Amino acid sequence: MSAYNMIYSSNMDEEGVIEKFDVIKRVNENLFDSIYEGMNGNSSTGIREDVLDYISQNINEFRSDWDYVFHITALVWDQKMSPEHIKLINSFFGNSAAGTHYALCEFVIVFTEAVQKDIPLEEISRILGSDDDIVDIQEKIAEWQPKEEHCDSTTVESEVVVDNPEEYENTNGSGYADMLSSIVNVMSYKDSHMDHSAIAIQGNFNKIIAKFQLAVTEISAYSAEVTHAVEKDRAENERLRAMLEFQKKVLNSQQQIINEQKGEIIRLKSVIQDAEKSQMQREEINNKILELQALTYASTSQEKIGSDYPY
């Protein structure tokens, strides 16, 4: 494995690192928030520099939904995950992926297990690229062993007996060679039966482990969904609570205005009533004045008539 540098929270203020995070933030803010928050203030959490380079240079290949972001972020903290590994995941689940019959959470579980076993990337791609069920994929990964050139004990001992029998006859006599041949035959017979039994038992164990891992995968996926739903509900509740507080303040303010307007209406009604009383009093006074004027006019007329026609 080629050497690589690690980026930690202490490096996040460096110019080159800031530029890479800025590129990620402009295109995929959810992925930026998840990676940045995971590193910020946590000195033990880091990301490979070549992985960060790959993400910033190919940010359009990364989805922004939270389920995808959650799993990708969990993977980038693993130092075994190279840019080629992330690229392979995006080939199955990225923005330009054609789609696959695997669930993302199941894929990530078996993919992580394969990486931890140091299975070559080409082999991982071949296994995951098949149409096998996820349980069969897990079995293949669990059973995978690196290809090593070795010979079992039966072959080695048989070759010793067959290839150089004279060497043993010359050294220890024919009796020693016969004894060694007998031991090989006995061990070969024993191993043939034990191997058959062990393979069957190992196969059963692998199936049980695969089912268990699938159950763990489903639990992890459900847990992630529940956690995301709880966080989403919590954020929604906070938003609704803030809206209710705002509406309460608005209603209180409106109620205060209504109360002030009610007071003003009562005052205006009082003014109108006083004005109406004043108007009525004024009309009464005018009527009295008219009556007095009429009486005065009548009295004056009577006096005038009396003076014109004396007795």
Image: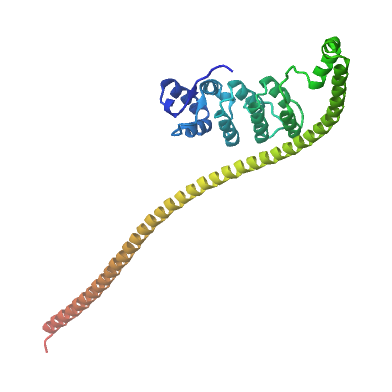
The image shows a total of numbered marks equal to 0
- Quadrant of the rendered image containing residue 3: top right
Give 46 or 306, whichever is nearer the viewer.
Answer: 46
Q: Is residue 288 above or below residue 46?
A: below
Quadrant position of the C terminus in the picture = bottom left
Q: Is residue 258 visible?
A: yes
- Quadrant of the rendered image containing residue 71: top right
Q: Is residue 84 above or below residue 64?
A: above
Whether residue 111 sits left or right of residue 231 in the image: it is: right
Q: Position of residue 154 (x, y in %)?
A: 82, 21
Residue drawn at x 31%, y 62% as measured from the top left: 264
Whether residue 80 sits left or right of residue 265 in the image: it is: right
Whether residue 106 sits left or right of residue 34 in the image: it is: right
- Quadrant of the rendered image containing residue 41: top left
Q: Is residue 272 above or below residue 53?
A: below
Give 243 or 7, whichever is nearer the viewer.
Answer: 7
Q: Position of residue 274 (x, y in %)?
A: 27, 69
Q: Is residue 96 visible?
A: no
Give 263 or 55, whichever is nearer the viewer.
Answer: 55
Quadrant position of the N terminus in the picture = top right
Residue drawn at x 67%, y 38% as measured from the top left: 217
Q: Position of residue 57 (x, y in %)?
A: 53, 20
Q: Position of residue 172 (x, y in %)?
A: 83, 14
Colour convention: rainbow
